[in-house]
Structure formats: C-alpha cells, structure tokens
Image (cartoon, rainbow, N blue to C red):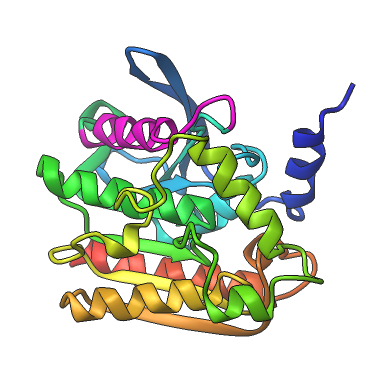
C-alpha cells in the first residue's frame, strides 16, 4: 500500500531528469544510524572536484533522495561540482536534532573525501525549505568544527518556527504550503520537548558572523518569503555577503516544478553560478 508520505514525495518529483556523468550511492555513519547519500558527478576525471552538500526540503517530515533528484542533477551540471544529497532521518520518527546530526555527519564524511575525488578545500552547502534550515545549522556547526565552506545556497528556507512573519499570515492559506501545515511540520520536528528558540532551529537568531557568502532565493507567493528575506538582512548585518533574489509570480516549491515553469531552471542556474564562482575563487 502506498503511504501518505510516498504520495507527497511523488508530488515533488519534477520532469525528465538531466543526464549526469555518474551517480553513486554512499553512506555516512553515526553511532545511532547510517545516513544514505547519493553522489552526482557532472564529469568523471582524475582531478579533485569541488562539492556541494545538498539537503532536501519537505518540512522535516517528507522528501527523499528521489523527490529532489532532478534538482540535484541540474545543480551538479550547472555548477560543475559534485553534488552529495543527504537522506537525513525524518520526523516524527526522529526528532530534532536528529536530522541536523545526520547532515553534520554527512559534511564530516565529505570533508574527509579524498578517496571520493572531492577537493575538501572547495565545499559548499545547499538546501531548500526545511533543507535550508538544516543547511544553515550545518554551516554553523562546520564553523565550530573548523570545516571551511565556500558558499551557502538557500532556496525558500524554513527559518521561523513561530510562523509569525507578515507573509506567513498574508499568504498562509489557499496555496500549496499553508501556515497551518508549516506549524504542523515544526511541531512534528520539535516534538513536545523541543525548544523553538534553540539557535540550531531558529537559525536567524544564531551568531551568523563569519559565515561564507550566501545565496538566497525566495518566492513572491510563499508564506516563507519574509522569514527568508529577514534572514538575508540579519546575515548582512553580521557582515556576511548575501545575494538575495525574489522570484516574482512563484510559489513555494517552484524549483521542483521545471515541467510547469522555466523560472525553476533559472533559479537553479542563478544559484549554481553563484556557488561556482565561490568554489573557483
């Protein structure tokens, strides 16, 4: 029987996937579990290649390697970097900070990736929606660990557990993502004992100073629009370089909708170009 999660995952799968040179499956490990990874190579050669760690969206509850396969392929081809997608543990089976711990373990694995043909001095991190939250949290952890990142890419990130921005209220009903649905996602992720003010969750409240350049994409008709743009302002105030783009006419999840709008491809191309510049510097 098909589960509700599988139905929602299928809704995020895009059109015909682009062909990359190679796809590999790997696994990172922490004491409690193994974390599946999917590695996309845009080219195959002997030279060490830069890499992007990618965390999928889905409200911490849904989403998978398959739901964001097309996006990861496009990101690899357009950036020229190896993309490593993380199959982090989902809520409510695994509560915070489980998903974040999985992503941090994946970054540590990638940072030690000489045998993978990856240049650990040229790493970036990227995520959409809930994956954007995990990307920032992982970047903050990397800073503590001394793991250097060149760029952070965020696509309509979920950053406000309170769901209390102006756009969350104004655009919180009648669209694919509603405010009520987002509140449920956060409650599933945090559980009864989770602290929504923890800076690893409410990452906009963390000390952002010293983070690498950030590219941030928001959608005009997205309840999460204002929290993403507020994060851009907070990062700039912390003297972080930020490129923020609002894609007009778009809704939450549009980057996975290449079969419906050419703006999806343009957003991925914009992000990939920013990341490529940082990885080449």
Quadrant position of the C terminus in the picture: bottom left
Tell me the quarter of the picture where residue 26 sits.
Answer: top left
Question: Would you say the magenta stretch is mainly helix, strand or loop?
Answer: helix
The percent coordinates of residue 88 (x first, y second) are 48, 32
Does residue 232 sit above or below 42 in this rendering? below
Residue at position x 71%, y 62% in the image: 177
Q: Is residue 106 magenta?
A: yes
Quadrant of the drawing holding the N terminus: top right
Q: Residue furthest top?
A: 31
Residue at the limit of the structure toward the right, as seen here:
1
User: What residue lies at 65% left-to-right and 67% top-to-bottom?
Assistant: 252
Left or right of residue 191: residue 122: left
From the viewer's perspective, is residue 143 above or below residue 190? below
Residue 143: horizontal and vertical position, in percent? 15, 49
Q: Residue at x 74, y 74 (%)?
A: 261
272, 31: nearer the viewer: 31
Residue 270 in sight here: no
Residue extending furthest front?
192
In this rendering, position of residue 232 left or right of residue 169: left
Residue 28 appearing in the image: yes
Q: Picture quarter containing residue 225?
A: bottom right
Where residue 139 appears, as percent x and y from the top left, is 26, 51
Q: Is residue 1 above or below residue 123?
A: above
The residue positioned 20% from the left and 30% from the top of the image is 112
Residue 85 at x, y = what percent? 48, 40
Q: What residue span does the magenta drawing correspond to?
A: 92-111
Q: 48 or 39: nearer the eye?
A: 39
């Amino acid at each position: 029987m098909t589960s509700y999660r599988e139905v929602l995952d299928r809704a995020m799968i895009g059109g015909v996937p682009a062909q990359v040179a190679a796809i590999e499956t790997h696994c990172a490990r922490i004491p409690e579990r193994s974390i599946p990874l999917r590695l996309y190579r845009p080219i195959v050669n002997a030279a060490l290649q830069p890499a992007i760690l990618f965390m999928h969206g889905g409200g911490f509850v849904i989403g998978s390697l398959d739901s964001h396969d097309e996006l990861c392929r496009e990101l690899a081809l357009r950036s020229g970097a190896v993309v490593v997608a993380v199959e982090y543990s989902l809520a409510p089976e695994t509560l915070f900070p489980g998903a974040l711990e999985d992503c941090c373990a994946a970054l540590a694995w990638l940072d030690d990736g000489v045998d993978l043909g990856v240049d650990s001095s040229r790493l970036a991190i990227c995520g959409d929606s809930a994956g954007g939250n995990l990307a920032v949290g992982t970047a903050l952890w990397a800073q503590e660990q001394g793991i250097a990142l060149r760029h952070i890419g965020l696509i309509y990130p979920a950053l406000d557990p309170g769901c209390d921005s102006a756009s969350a209220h104004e655009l919180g009903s009648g669209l694919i993502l509603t405010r009520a649905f987002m509140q449920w996602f956060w409650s599933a992720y945090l559980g009864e004992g989770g602290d929504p003010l923890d800076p690893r969750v409410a990452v906009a409240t963390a000390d952002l100073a010293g983070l690498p350049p950030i590219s941030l994409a928001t959608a005009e008709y997205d309840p999460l629009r204002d929290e993403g743009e507020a994060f851009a302002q907070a990062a700039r105030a912390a003297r972080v370089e930020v490129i923020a783009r609002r894609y007009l006419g778009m809704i939450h999840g549009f980057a996975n909708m290449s079969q419906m709008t050419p703006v999806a491809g343009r957003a991925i191309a914009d992000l990939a170009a920013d990341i490529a510049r940082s990885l080449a510097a």
